[in-house]
Image (tube, rainbow, N blue to C red):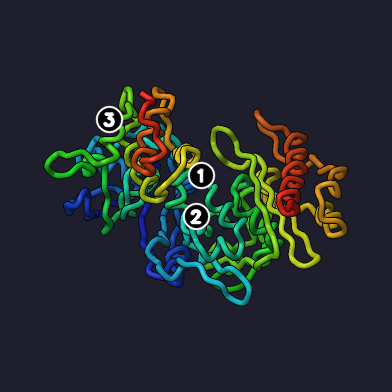
Amino acid sequence: MTIDVTLKVNGVERSAKVEARTLLAELLRDHLKLTGTHVGCDTTQCGCCVVHLDGKAIKSCTILAVQAKGRSVTTIEGLAAPDGTLHPMQEAFREHHGLQCGFCTPGMVMMGADIARRNPGADEHTVRHELEGNICRCTGYQGIVEAILSVANPDAVRKDHH
Amino acid sequence: MRDFDYHLAADVKSAIETLRNSEDGKIVAGGMTLLPTLKQRLAAPSDLIDLGGIDALRGISIEDNHVVIRAMTIHADVGASDVVKKAIPALAVLAGGIGDPAVRHRGTIGGSIANSDPAADYPGGVMGLGATIVTDRREIAGDDFFLGLFETALEPDELITSVRFPIPDQAHYIKFKHPASGYAVVGVMVSKTGGKVRVGVTGAGPCAFRVTAFETALEKSFSPDAIADITVDAEDLNTDINFSAEYRAHIVGVLARRCVAALTKG
């Protein structure tokens, strides 16, 4: 079954003809060529494909493209300001060395922004718990956790740590 | 994933009609279990009927000393709900511990309960709190709802519309999570209402169940020691490469005692 899907992606209305079984991650990457959203495990575990659907972090490998019809999706490409100024979470990942190879980074940054939105003043334990669905094989999470903490709760991050 | 015909249902009635008229249709709620199942081709339905557009199936309210959660309410909303946190904090803890934040933004209570996954959290909550499952046509006591592995009392064309949780005096939920998947290896919900105690277990068996031997002992004396010498029969429990049935039986007792300890301290 082929379906016309129109949705807002990073503030712009986009349309695509997709099969019913097309995943949102596939719509973004293959049809709209927004390849910043990564697919790591394709089994809802790794979190590399996290995007925001109507402002909430979801795994785009586990939702059909048609289920996002008429809704608003933000991907890593849409997080920075139009003039290129990084989103505070992106800036924090740069500042705190929250990435190495970069594969998990789009999902980490999107989830990090969602964690900071939902948990202002969060402590380290909360941030680590909330990162349960995002897997990084390089960093050991320390820089990632510090980056997210620095946005969610600036007072909690020791300035002398790195 | 095999392709299918997709239908966005306008209401419960039309969802059921579409389901009845389809060759081998399936309902999708949050899709957190169904979509992975389709990807693995463990299921290949002819039609997918999406309840995601039915706003009447979302929301949390207090009615007649019950917390009523409509079927399409996502785990994140239950976990963060001030109403649930005040009335049954253990239920908010349960919902807030399902999967991960992204999963909790899609997964629904109705989908979790209708699926009767042996390792899902909500079925343990239903048994431990004595909830009632409300469908499009009747009310089903939680005790009669879970029949086996992925098997429930629902008719093939029956939809859950809400779940009614009686508000207990006290309740506590603890799960021992699988370290990789986060699913419950064992999850235990203990609740106390007047002199009545319920002990609901998920993860350990083919579907959620109660440990009546614990309940009887706890009704006589609500303390961890009261159940310390009661063993749970491992006979019908789940075994996998990581956790044997005997291990799970042991953990049921450990978690039940920890729940009681949490409810009796200070």
Identity of the residue drawn at 40% across and 60% down: B52
Identity of the residue drawn at 34% across and 54% down: A67
Residue picked out by circle 3: A94
Q: Nearer the viewer, residue B37 or B141?
A: B141
Marks 1 and 2 close (CB-CB < 8 Å): yes
Residue picked out by circle 1: B99
Q: Secondary structure at mark 2?
A: helix
Question: The N terminus of chain B is located in which quarter?
Answer: top left
Other residues around mark 2 within 10 Å, as few (<14) / some (14–19) / many (≥20): many
Q: Label 2 vs label 3: CA separation?
A: 32 Å
Circle 3 marks a residue in which chain?
A
Residue picked out by circle 2: B75
Going by the numbered disc 3, the residue's amino acid type is: Arg
Same chain assignment for discs 1 and 2: yes
Name the residue at the left extreme: A83
Other residues around mark 3 within 10 Å, as few (<14) / some (14–19) / many (≥20): some
Q: How many marks?
A: 3
